[in-house]
Image: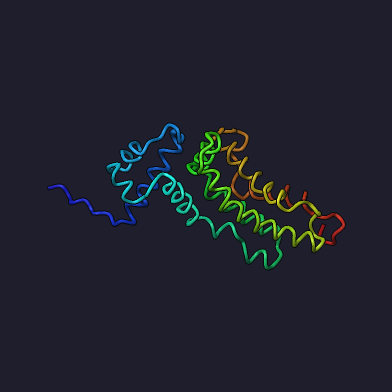
C-alpha cells in the first residue's frame, strides 16, 4: 500500500510555489513563463497559486522576501563596522555574496532576465533591498572618509563598486564559465577582491594608508 502523502500547511505550500516560480523564471525568463508552467513545476493547479498570491506582483514580492530572509542579516556586518575593521567589513559582505550565489545562480538569473526584459522584479529589488543596502554601506564608507582613513570618493559609487566586483566575478565563473576563475578557493577570491578594493580606497595620507 502506498504511503499517504503528507498534507502541506499553507506556509509550506506558499514556499513550494515560490521555489517553483524561481526555477521557472530563472530558466525561461519572465516573458517565457506562465502560471501554468509554475503550477506544473509545483505539481498543483493554477487556482492554487492564486489562493496564495493575489497577482503576479504579489508573487514577485514574495520571491524577493523569501530570498532576503536567508541572506539579509549576513550582508550587514554591524559588529565589524562598530569596530571600524574595514577589511572585515568588506570580507564579510564578499563572503556572504559568494556563499549565496556560487553554485546556485537562480536569483542572479532572475534579476538578469528581469532587467533585460524590462520586468518589474529588478525594479522592485533595486528600489527596495539593494538601495537599503547601498545606503547602509555608503554611510559607513562616508564615516571612514570623514575619519581620514579612506579616500574622499563618493560613497554611493564606492558601495556599488564593491558589490559590482564580486557580482561580476560570480557572473564570469558561474554563468559564463570562465576557466581562469574555476580553481580559485573562496578564501583566495575574498582576499583578492578585498585587497583590490581596500587598497584602492585607502587614503595614502592616513597613518593606516
* Colour scheme of the rendered structure: rainbow
Q: Is residue 84 above or below residue 104?
A: below
Figure quadrant of residue 178: top right
| Residue 140 x %, y % | 70, 60
| Residue 27 x %, y % | 44, 35
Q: In the rendered view, does 114 fall on the left or right side of 50? A: right
Q: In the rendered view, does 9 fall on the left or right side of 144? A: left
Q: In the rendered view, does 83 fall on the left or right side of 43? A: right
| Residue 185 x %, y % | 59, 46
Q: Residue at x 58, y 41 (%)?
A: 170
| Residue 113 x %, y % | 51, 36
Between 162 and 37, the one nearer to me in the picture? 37
Identity of the residue furthest to the right in this view = 205
Between 54 and 63, the one nearer to me in the picture? 54
Q: Name the image quarter holding the C terminus.
A: bottom right
Q: Residue at x 71, y 65 (%)?
A: 84
Q: Residue at x 37, y 43 (%)?
A: 20
Between 197 and 125, the one nearer to me in the picture? 125
Image mark count: 0
Identity of the residue furthest to the left in this view = 1
Identity of the residue furthest to the front in this view = 54
Q: Is residue 90 above or below residue 45?
A: below
Q: Residue at x 51, y 38 (%)?
A: 119
Figure quadrant of residue 85: bottom right
Amino acid at each position: 500500500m502506498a504511503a499517504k502523502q503528507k498534507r502541506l500547511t499553507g506556509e509550506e505550500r506558499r514556499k513550494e510555489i515560490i521555489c517553483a516560480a524561481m526555477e521557472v523564471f530563472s530558466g525561461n525568463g519572465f516573458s517565457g513563463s506562465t502560471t501554468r508552467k509554475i503550477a506544473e513545476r509545483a505539481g498543483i493547479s493554477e487556482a492554487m497559486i492564486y489562493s496564495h498570491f493575489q497577482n503576479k506582483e504579489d508573487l514577485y514580492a514574495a520571491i524577493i522576501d523569501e530570498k532576503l530572509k536567508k541572506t539579509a542579516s549576513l550582508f550587514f556586518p554591524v559588529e565589524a563596522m562598530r569596530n571600524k575593521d574595514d577589511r572585515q567589513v568588506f570580507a564579510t559582505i564578499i563572503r556572504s555574496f559568494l556563499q549565496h550565489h556560487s553554485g546556485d545562480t537562480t536569483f542572479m538569473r532572475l534579476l538578469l532576465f528581469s532587467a533585460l526584459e524590462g520586468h518589474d522584479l529588478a525594479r522592485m529589488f533595486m528600489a527596495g533591498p539593494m538601495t537599503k543596502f547601498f545606503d547602509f554601506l555608503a554611510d559607513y564608507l562616508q564615516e571612514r572618509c570623514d575619519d581620514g582613513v579612506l579616500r574622499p570618493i563618493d560613497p554611493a559609487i564606492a558601495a556599488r563598486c564593491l558589490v559590482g566586483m564580486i557580482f561580476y566575478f560570480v557572473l564570469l565563473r558561474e554563468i559564463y564559465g570562465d576557466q581562469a576563475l574555476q580553481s580559485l578557493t573562496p578564501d583566495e577570491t575574498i582576499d583578492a577582491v578585498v585587497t583590490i578594493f581596500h587598497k584602492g580606497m585607502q587614503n595614502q595620507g592616513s597613518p593606516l594608508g
